[in-house]
Amino acid sequence: MKRNPKNIADVLTQTYTDLLRDCIRDVRNFPKRGIVFKDITPILRDPKLFNAAIDVLADRHIGSKLDAIVVIDARGFIFGSAMAYKLGCGIVPVRKKGKLPYKTIEEHYKLEYGEAAMEMHSDALKKGDRVVLVDDLLATGGTAAAASKLVKALGANLIEIDFLIELTFLKGRKRLAGSPVFAAIQF
């Protein structure tokens, strides 16, 4: 019987995501009481797990001819940099206000109590650049929504927004409506 390579890839991806899910530890009451923090440091520490995480995120974009991976401060830098290396493209950092040294554009977004801003260099992307936006975790979606607005403001083509983890109960995808979203692991 002939096997469809797409199905084999899907099986491998599911095996990787199951393995990765089992290695994410819950840390209760961090950073404050009532929060259950999803700790990815066991994945980062183990080379095989880290490679699996990068493969799950990057392999879906092989052949996509991306110009850049846009990485969100700070853990997006970890995953997005490795993805960019594997895919042969550059990275563009999106950082908290005041952290980038050159001319920037900024996007404000609401937090639970207050407001914050993300910035990107004003010359980081060109009109028509094909980019994927990457962060480690999708919670309420505020940071990713702000970063996607920066990408679009510079005229780049946002192919997808990728996360290692999504906390589905926080409904962050709603804030990213209009952009394709991929999350390898959902809780």
Image (cartoon, helix red, strand yellow):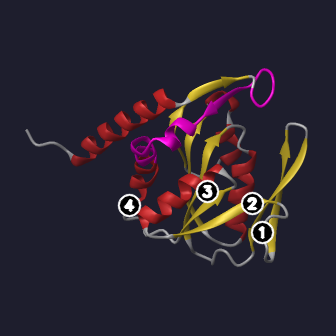
Residue 95, numbered circle: 2
Numbered badge on residue 62: 4
Residue type, numbered disc 3? Phe
- Element type at mark 2: strand
- Packing grade of label 3 (10 A; few <14, some 14-19, many >=20) is many
Question: Does dot 4 land on a helix, a strand or a loop?
Answer: loop
Is any part of residue 12 visible from this angle?
Answer: yes
Q: Closer to the N terminus: mark 2 or mark 1?
A: 2
Q: Mark 1 — residue? A: 100
Percent coordinates x, y for residue 141 in the rendering = 71, 43
Mark 1 or mark 4, which is nearer the start of the sequence? 4
2 vs 4, front mark: 2
Whether residue 35 is in magenta: the answer is: yes
Measure the C-alpha gap from mark 3 to mark 1.
14 Å
Q: State the SS at label 3.
A: helix
Tell me: 145 left or right of 69. Answer: right
Q: Is residue 168 toward the left or the right of residue 185 in the image?
A: right
Q: Quadrant of residue 186?
A: top right
What segment is highlighted magenta in the picture? 30-53
- The Cα atoms of the two marked residues, 4 and 1, are separated by 30 Å
Relative side of 84 to 161, left or right: left
Residue bearing the label numbered 3: 77
Relative to 135, is 33 above or below?
above
- Give percent across and percent down for residue 8: 25, 42
Residue at coordinates 84% horizontally, 42% vertically from top-left?
111
Q: Residue furthest left?
A: 1
- Label 2 CA crowd tier, 10 Å (few <14, some 14–19, many 20+): many
